[in-house]
Image (spheres, grey):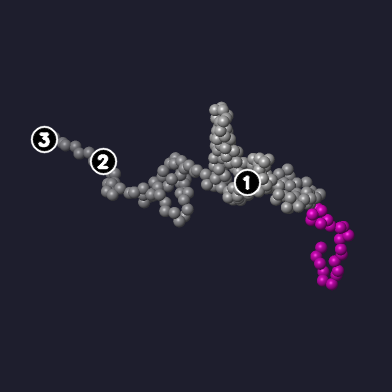
Amino acid sequence: MAHIPGMARKKDPTPKAKPAERALTERLPAHQLWPVDKVVKTSWIAVEREKLNEIASLLWLPEDMDEAAKNARIIKAVDLFESIKPADGMEAMLAVQMVGAHEAAMECLRRAMVPGQTFEGRANNLGHAQKMMSLYARQLAALDKHRGKGEQKVTVKHVHVASGGQAIVGNVEAGTAAEPESAPSARPASLEAPSVPLPSAGPERVRTRGRRK
């Protein structure tokens, strides 16, 4: 109903719920969550401390190591995590796993160098170190692929040569011509035209030699 000047609006007697209260009465899909601060009561300092504990739990900290040395090892692991520069949650999870794989590989290598152990024990530690280093390489490849830096392969199926000696590389379908995938400012690939012009193909002339009478 339109508002007429000079007439006061009637207030709706039904109390409206606040946005937060109205949201709590709705059911979200399985892949979504409510704002965590609306459900879980904790401090953000505790959350940040848990992030550090997640990295610290991946390290081997001997009981006889003093507190300063333990903190130094934790800070070193955090530096490795931050050097990866994760940009989202997926990269953050992968970065933590990469730190864990690196620390496990280094610990296996250290144990392999302990003197007085059997040949089988040293080979076992070196084998585990090799597995961890291979895992780290796969994690690094997955990170590069997620960031769009992975190895890209280009398969040329058809080459269409247009007028002027320019070549268009791509999948060519019947009745259509594929456009080059390079940027507009990039120079398209071209095939060099022959230096000697080729004569146009015309009807073949056949000479017949008649007999003189």
Q: What's the residue at 57%, 34% (across, down)? A: 114
Image coordinates for residue 69, horizontal then vertical, percent: 64, 46
Question: Alpha-carbon neighbours of circle 3 within 10 Å: few (<14), some, or many (≥20)?
Answer: few
- Residue 14 in the magenta stretch? The answer is yes
Eye-nearest disc, 2 or 3:
2
Magenta span: 1-22
Q: Quadrant of the N terminus?
A: bottom right
From this view, report whether residue 164 is shown above or below residue 7: above
Out of 175 and 147, give the one closest to the viewer. 147
Question: In whole angstroms, how far apart are the C-alphas of marks 3 and 1?
Answer: 114 Å
Quadrant, the C terminus? top left
- In this rendering, the label closer to the viewer, 1 or 2: 1
Residue that numbered label 2 is attached to: 204
Residue 203 x, y percent position in the rendering? 27, 42
- Which residue is painted at 83% across and 56% down in the image? 17
In the picture as drawn, the residue positioned furthest to the left comes out as 213
Say which label, 1 or 2, has the lower sequence index: 1
Residue 94 lies within the magenta run: no
Mark seen at residue 213: 3
Quarter holding residue 13: bottom right
* 3 or 1: tag closer to the N-terminus: 1
Marks 2 and 3, Cα distance to the nearest angstrom?
Answer: 28 Å
Alpha carbon distance from label 1 to label 2: 87 Å
**Residue in the image at 26% along x and 40% along y:** 204
Q: Amino acid at mark 2?
A: Glu
Label 3 vs label 1, nearer the camera? 1
Q: Which mark is residue 73?
A: 1
Location of residue 157 (image quadrant): top left
Measured as percent of width and height from the top left, residue 60 is found at 64, 40
Q: Nearer the viewer, residue 43 or 201?
A: 43
Q: At numbered mark 2, what does the secondary structure look like: helix, strand or loop?
A: loop
Q: Amino acid at mark 3?
A: Lys
